[in-house]
Image: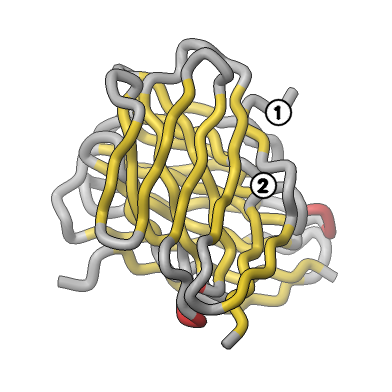
Amino acid sequence: NAGVTQTPKFQVLKTGQSMTLQCAQDMNHNSMYWYRQDPGMGLRLIYYSASEGTTDKGEVPNGYNVSRLNKREFSLRLESAAPSQTSVYFCASSEWYEQYFGPGTRLTVT
Amino acid sequence: DQQVKQNSPSLSVQEGRISILNCDYTNSMFDYFLWYKKYPAEGPTFLISISSIKDKNEDGRFTVFLNKSAKHLSLHIVPSQPGDSAVYFCAAGNTGFQKLVFGTGTRLLVSP
């Protein structure tokens, strides 16, 4: 039982490049989330998916797209990376209030 | 507009003493609250929660207190241990919406 897994762990991109962050959970949770963590800003919600086939914007969705591929997987795509997207990205899943987090992806955009 | 605030960025405590971490919220619609602990290079892990129908919840060395009238919650760790050194986030949510709003975190350092 791996919980929530994220790939890659680290990534360096040049401005304008694109990439997809992958997330998978094996807890059969309905809801999944993408957050970013920046110094002094806490965890801010980018997008979430309340169930398979649905996605909604969070607090900071600009510059990102998401896909809920199936119940297990929720990916986050940066179409044209910008230095402001340098951050640590966390995926989480939940069945009710308590969210379970993955280990994070540290992304640097130069 | 920050709906969940942790006004102390850091706290230092000696081993064996009590650690008290504070959190304030502004949205009266929040009806459940959680504390998460985060070590460097790891994801946050759930620690303890409380619903608005209670004013206290205990789990071992960890106790969360909720004061609804003051819109304030606190996490007490007794006794504090060096392994408790981490960043602690409080989070708040509303029944029916599974989104959480997180505070900015408090870094706790417990020294031997």
Question: As displayed, is residue A94 above or below residue B97?
Answer: below
Q: Is residue A49 left or right of residue A83?
A: left
Whether pointer 1 and pointer 2 mark residues with C-beta atoms closer than 8 Å, the reply is: yes
Q: Could you classify mark 1 by the number of other residues whose Cα lies within 10 Å: few (under 14), some (14-19), or many (20 or more)?
A: some
Quarter of the image with the N terminus of chain B is top right
Q: Which mark is residue B67?
A: none
Residue positioned 42% across, 63% down in the render? B78
Amino acid type, label 2: Thr
Question: What amino acid is labelled 1 in the image?
Answer: Gln
Is any atom of residue A85 visible in this view? no
Q: Secondary structure at mark 2?
A: loop
> Which residue appears at 28% of the width and 19% of the height?
B53
Residue A30 percent location from the top left of the image: 22, 38
Residue, disc 2: B104
Q: Chain of mark 2?
A: B
Labels 1 and 2: the sequence-earlier one: 1
Q: Is residue A84 visible?
A: yes
Q: Which residue is mark 1?
A: B2
Picture residue at 57% right of the left edge, 50% below the top: B21
